[in-house]
Image: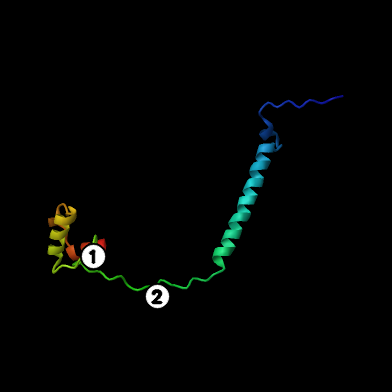
Amino acid sequence: QEQRLVRDGTDHLKGGKSSKSKKKQQRQQSEKKEEEKVDESTNSAPMDVSPEDEPEPVIDPNECPFDGTIHDSPSSNLKYMKEKFSFFLPDKEYCVDMKGLLGYCN
């Protein structure tokens, strides 16, 4: 006698794995192997630069962050940036550390 399989959409509930789930599992395994290869290649070389070795950034509030021109004071720098680049600080009366802000922009 010939047995006929009836697919009613409940194969996943019966514990059987469909061909789609097998393909998905195979794809996941191959992706995992690729990730392991990448991890091995990136972890093989030690890092040469540690955070302690990095030089401290130079913060100059008199330097324009857009073109690097040096000015006499932070206020003349702001005036220059406003005229040349339309850069301005809204509500600058509330800014408590103008030098720090301009240095941070660099």
Q: Quadrant of residue 81?
A: bottom left
Q: Report how far apart the C-alphas of labels 1 and 2 lie in the structure.
A: 26 Å
- The percent coordinates of residue 87 (x first, y second) are 18, 54
Residue 97 in sight in this render: no
Name the amino acid, label 2: Asp
For label 1, the residue is 68
Front position among marks 1 and 2: 1
Figure check: 58 above or below 24: below
- The percent coordinates of residue 83 (x first, y second) are 14, 55
Residue drawn at x 40%, y 75% is: 53
Name the amino acid, label 1: Gly
Residue 56 in sight in this render: yes
Quarter occupied by the N terminus = top right
Viewer-proximal residue, 17 or 76? 76
Furthest-bottom residue in this view: 53
For label 2, the residue is 53
Figure check: 35 above or below 14: below
Quarter occupied by the C terminus = bottom left
Residue drawn at x 67%, y 30% is: 10
Instruction: Find residue 38 and name its label.
Output: none
Mark 1: secondary structure: loop
- Within-10-Å neighbours for mark 1: few <14, some 14–19, many 20+: few
Upstream in sequence: badge 1 or badge 2? 2
Residue drawn at x 43%, y 72% is: 50
Viewer-proximal residue, 42 or 4? 42
